[in-house]
Image (cartoon, rainbow, N blue to C red):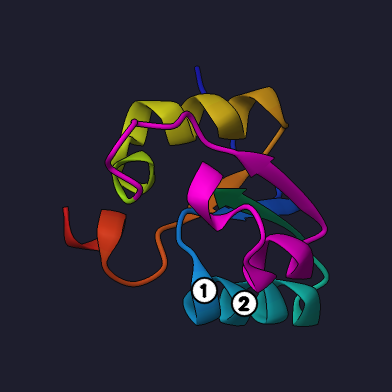
Amino acid sequence: GDQLRDIRKVLCANRGEIAVRVFRAAAELGLLSVAAYSVQDRLMPHRYKADESYQLVDVPGKPVACYLDVEGIVALAKQHDVDAVHPGYGFLSER
């Protein structure tokens, strides 16, 4: 069966100040933080405030759609050994 494991790395599936706050809290807890960003957000500060950052799969003409792509976010998290996903505010947290 599934085993519980310690959380060492958390991905915030959000952007902007919300993500920065999640990264700050993660640092205070001794966790590594991971930013997920869209092509359009590649120069935004939240990408640089995390310990790691990875680009989400782009949906042409819909810059916010990648933040709602649950399967894509989970795949990204698995690919980079992320232990937990924080939805932030809005986007996934409202689904």
> Answer yes or no: do the residues labelled 2 and 1 have beta carbons within 8 Å?
yes
Circle 1: residue type: Gly
Q: Secondary structure at mark 2?
A: helix
Mark 1 Cα shell of 10 Å, populated few (<14), some (14-19), many (≥20): few
Estimate the x, y position of residue 83 in percent, counting from the top left: 64, 43
Residue under label 1, please give it. Answer: 16
In this rendering, would 76 be left or right of 5? left
Q: Which corner quadrant of the image does residue 28 belong to?
A: bottom right
- Which label sits on residue 39? none
Mark 2 Cα shell of 10 Å, populated few (<14), some (14-19), many (≥20): many
Residue projecting furthest to the top: 1
| Magenta-drawn stretch contains 40 | yes
Circle 2: residue type: Val
Looking at the image, residue 35 lies above or below residue 5: below
At horizontal 62% and vertical 77% (from top left) the residue drawn is 20
Please tell me which residue lies in front, 15 or 29. Answer: 15
| Magenta-drawn stretch contains 81 | no
Closer to the camera: disc 2 or disc 1?
Answer: 1
In this rendering, would 77 be left or right of 30? left
Residue under label 2, please give it. Answer: 20
Look at the image and tell me whether residue 38 can be seen. Answer: no
At horizontal 47% and vertical 54% (from top left) the residue drawn is 13
Estimate the x, y position of residue 87 in percent, counting from the top left: 40, 59
The span picked out in magenta is 39-63
Looking at the image, residue 33 lies above or below residue 88: above
Estimate the x, y position of residue 29 in percent, counting from the top left: 75, 76
Please tell me which residue lies in front, 8 or 47. Answer: 47
At horizontal 76% and vertical 70% (from top left) the residue drawn is 49
Q: Secondary structure at mark 1?
A: helix
Look at the image and tell me whether residue 64 can be seen. Answer: yes
